[in-house]
Image (tube, rainbow, N blue to C red):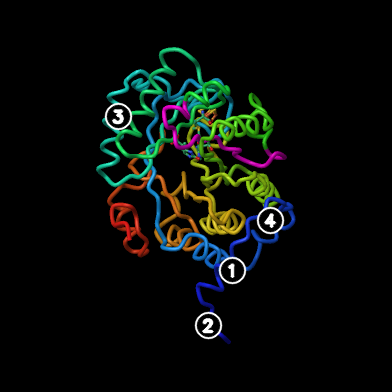
Amino acid sequence: MPVLVAKDLNSKAVVLRYDWTVDQVRDLLERPLMDLLWQAQLVHRAANPGYRVQLASLLSVKTGGCQEDCAYCPQSMHNSSDVEGQPELVVQVQAVLERARAAKEAGADRFCMGWAWREIRDGVQFEAMLAMVSGVRALGLEACVTAGMLTDKQASQLAKVGLTAYNHNLDTSPEHYDQIITTRTYQERLETIQRVRSAGISLCCGGIIGMGESIEDRASLLCVLANINPHPESVPINALVAVEGTPLEDLPEVDPLEMVRMVATARILMPRSRVRLSAGREQLGREAQILCLQAGADSIFYGDTLLTTSNPHVEADRELLAQAGVHASWQVSDE
Ligand code: SAM
Ligand code: DTB
Ligand code: SF4
């Protein structure tokens, strides 16, 4: 059998499509694992040569007290887990930029900032957000904001100060959605995503598994994401972190191979998007994380905390990436 060379891979593996059906996506998700991994590898190597992993650090700028009732979220005021009361950084521009500087020194490429809001509010807090974004960009980092819904005007102001990406997840399938959130509709999420796009900001949009959804729901979520044209520039795949005091606290941990399957399928569907292995990595273990990298994950959240929960330690992640033989930015010179 002839050896498959890079030229063949490039011509055959990278197909950008926006007309996936749920059945086609489900067929991928349920393929024999070895076949799924092989196809994901072909696509990933052809579309994103070099196995570089982007490191994104997260900071919670506004923590807790959120009006939305997302069943997974420790920051919702509807959940007894609500973590409100933590020190507020909302107008502390310099303190936030200090954290960004530290993230850069630790090797991060992107600095993501989160606000536990239903939607962005105008006024001093938004002015501070704009200053934070422009400060992060001035440090030479990509800047990402996640702060709920936004208006066209706010999106264009964020674009003007150089915001790289806005994160707004679909979280789950349209069919499973009302089991998880009732205070904001799926349609509102799609409209927010459209606003981000119209302002010329990169879109970071993904979801969570392990929230009691079926395989069909996972296929349906991936299908909605893969039919966004152009594909979201980054796609976070989260495993539920079941936090005490949330309605989902007793759900069982996600089987690590289910994360591998989600990542591999996302990679095949959205060949050039950054697929970010997001919340839930602590439950995955080293080998499952390496399988996810092999399946095409090319970004991780990097830093000892996510928003309110913990993440693997920076040293452990450096070791993991070295063991996997993938390159992160601090190791890569511009070849
Ligand atoms: N309030 C904003 C919003 O909902 O867009 C921004 C912050 S919110 C915490 C960002 C995303 O984090 C959510 O959409 C969800 O996908 C993810 N997330 C929150 N809590 C999580 C949990 N316990 N486990 C996994 N992912 C979670
Ligand atoms: C995303 O998809 N996952 C990140 C980021 N985008 C903002 C957040 C994960 C949060 C996990 C729970 C917590 O730490 O509060
Ligand atoms: Fe949590 Fe964001 Fe939902 Fe608020 S909107 S409860 S911060 S996920």
Mark 1 vs mark 2: in front: 1
Instruction: Give the spatial CA distance, label 4 vs label 3.
Output: 41 Å
Q: Give the magenta part as a residue range.
A: 158-176
Give the residue drawn at x 67%, y 42%.
173
- Residue 54 position within the rendered picture, expressed as x and y whole percent measured from the top left: 40, 50
Mark 2 vs mark 3: in front: 2
**Disc number for residue 97:** 3
Dot 4 or dot 2, earlier in sequence:
2
Q: Amino acid at mark 4?
A: Val
Q: Amino acid at mark 1?
A: Ser
Residue identifier under label 2: 3
Dot 2 or dot 3, earlier in sequence:
2
Q: Nearer the viewer, residue 206 or 77?
A: 206
- Label 3 CA crowd tier, 10 Å (few <14, some 14–19, many 20+): many
Residue identifier under label 1: 11
Instruction: Give the spatial CA distance, label 1 vs label 3.
Output: 44 Å
Instruction: Give the spatial CA distance, label 1 vs label 4.
Output: 22 Å
Q: Quadrant of residue 136?
A: top left
**Disc number for residue 25:** 4
Q: Nearer the viewer, residue 29 or 121?
A: 121
